[in-house]
Amino acid sequence: MSYNVIYDSANWFDATWAVMIVVATLLALVLIRALLQPGAALRESGLGRTGLFAGLAIIGVLLPVLLIDVVGNAWGLKDASRPGNCQEVEGLVADFVPEPALGHRSESFSVGGLRFSYSSSDLTVGGFRWSSGAGGPIRGGLPVRICFVRDGARNVIVRLEVANPT
């Protein structure tokens, strides 16, 4: 049986990361402008000086910490999908539970008795997280080959391959 690679952590930089970097850059520019020209920023925002600087401090501290965490998780898995760095399982998707339309609950399924779960809204965990509600490929009965690593009690998908239709 031949397979198509749908996800590989070695190619971790996708549109999500690009958007996050653009947003972080724009917020950093706003922060710099507010620090260099506090009067103009205050007039345009309608916030008081304390509110503006509190908001900018939160953005200036939390955003970099979040980005470092998220990018660090993805970067840490970038070599995990290489042969010998992960465990593989092959079989049909069973016990498929899709992520709800509003997210905030994990999508899950089993292959070969191993359970996998992920959420498209959870950026803090690396690995595959493209839910079926967002157009992801996983469906019940789908033949797949999965390369995964253990992260505590969780199986993290670092490479997902779907069988070619015959």
Image: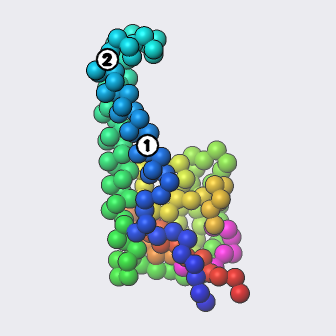
Which segment did they paint magenta?
138-145
Q: Which residue is mark 1?
A: 22
Q: Is residue 21 visible?
A: yes
Q: Are marks 1 and 2 in contact (CB under 8 Å)?
A: no
Q: Position of residue 118 (x, y in %)?
A: 52, 58
Q: Position of residue 58 (x, y in %)?
A: 34, 28
Compared to residue 95, the image places residue 33 above or below, namely above
Q: Residue at x 47, y 58 (%)?
A: 14
Work out whether residue 23 or residue 94 is closer to the camera in this orientation and state it: 23
Q: Which residue is mark 2?
A: 37
- Specify the amino acid type for callout 1: Val
Report x, y in % for residue 62: 34, 35
Q: Is residue 144 magenta?
A: yes
Report crowding for label 1: few under 14, some 14 to 19, many 20 or more residues within 10 A (C-alpha).
Answer: few
Place residue 111 in its image quadrant: bottom right
- Is residue 86 depicted above or below 1 in this figure? above
